[in-house]
Image (spheres, rainbow, N blue to C red):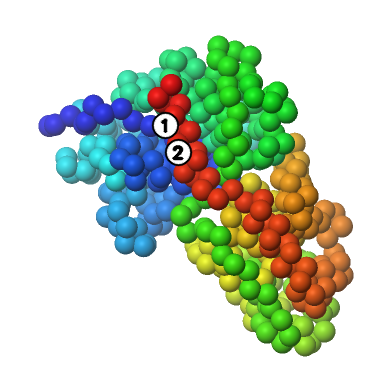
Amino acid sequence: MRRPSAKRSIIVVAGGTGGHVFPALALAEELRTQGHDIIFFTDPRGAKFMPVPQDFQQDFHNATPQKTNQEGREPCAVFMKYQNDVDLDPDVRRPHSLRDEDCKLLPGNIVVRVLPLQGRQNPVKFYFSLVRCLLKGLSDVRRYRPKIVAGFGGYPALTWGLIAGLFRIPLIIHEQNAILGRTNRLLTRWANCVALTFKSVSPAFGPHEMGTGTRTSTSTVTGVPVREAFKSVDYDSSKGQESFRLLVLGGSQGAKIFGDVIPKAIQLLPKPLQERLEITQQCGIEDLDKVKRTYEGTGVKVSIAPFFHHVAGLLEASHLVIARAGASTIAEITTVGRPALFVPLPGARDDHQTANARTVVTAEGGWLFDQRTLTPERVASFLRRALECPSILLLAAEGARREGHQGATQKLSKLVLACLAN
């Protein structure tokens, strides 16, 4: 049996939330189009964000390469189950179910490995699984011969960041939020470069340099990589009796509060304003029926689902967005250029979502409401003003677009390749 190509790979690794995984996927796809072999590491939570059919997500071990994705493009992933290396052929390190011609790291394939991180609620079990991932990563260094590691935060990135430091592999880390996360904070001492989303993060390290370990890192503001579908689109105000499209996004962790408050706020609006509204709202599966019942009796056209695959199109069509303030959500909203009301997730580590939202509010690109004071009456008052004064939304759309980082994916890919060249 033929052995895989000896071409060295780029490791992209991200923790298991959409805020980590989506930017990492955007970078991986960009580097893939340039002909680089990509090995994408995540954990079981991150696997659900992979752009593949549901049956792949449920059974990695028996997966076969995806021939085309939903847009009919090139294959985007070949999945491998990380937990059972005993089931992998030692020559090609692929599941036996894959044909030999599919086993090489060919340009056009992103190999996704799922790290066996488990027991997050049990510290002892979790740290044992973290050590296990680290030990398996040591063998993967020989297997994939990585030329650089790009980490996007979360515990999977901690594993590969430590390996990069140990083997002197070039390391670049990306911080999506306005406050440096714990993993990235630790890895700055081994990183060659830290890519930032917000300029306000830089003073935490000094203006240009950071790191107290074996390397001195430089910081560069690139913005958050977003998928190709997200692009700047002119804002079209809703005037007079025209339809007003409201988009409500809960983020990868959902937002039960939106299902509790927003439908009740709509009920408080005058009927003529209700009849103008077209609402697309994300909510958890367990709340779907309750939210639908609350909207009954209003004059609102409403579409409710746990997840939307075409968020870019929904953003382009929207007049106002109500959303959490995760870095990826903010990046997508500001890239398209839409006014938004941000309600940060309470309890987010270091309250980073509030810090994220304040950067957009400071740029006059949106508004910030604390969830503790988020009442139907307050939201209804805000929506009434937005419906009756479209000029304030137009100004906020312009502010949001100014805050957006156009071409962030390309900037970050160039930074990765420049780090390789040095």
At a point 35% along the width and 33% down the height, the residue shown is 84
The quadrant of the rendering that contains the N terminus is top left
Position of residue 59 measured from the top left corner of the image (x, y, whole percent): 37, 48
Kind of residue indicated by mark 2: Ser
Looking at the image, can residue 322 be seen? no
- On screen, residue 404 versus residue 140, left or right, reads right
Q: Nearer the viewer, residue 148 or 370?
A: 148
Residue at mark 1: 417
Position of residue 403 measured from the top left corner of the image (x, y, whole percent): 67, 51
Q: Nearer the viewer, residue 207 or 161?
A: 207
User: Is disc 1 surrounded by few (<14), some (14 to 19) or many (20+) residues within 10 Å?
Assistant: few
At a point 50% along the width and 64% down the height, the residue shown is 310
- On screen, residue 397 versus residue 70, left or right, reads right
Position of residue 7 measured from the top left corner of the image (x, y, whole percent): 26, 29
Q: Contact, CB < 8 Å: mark 2 with mark 1?
A: yes
At a point 21% along the width and 31% down the height, the residue shown is 4
156 in relation to 112, above or below: above
The quadrant of the rendering that contains the C terminus is top left
Q: Residue furthest left?
A: 1
264 in relation to 191, above or below: below
At a point 63% along the width and 69% down the height, the residue shown is 235
364 in relation to 412, above or below: below
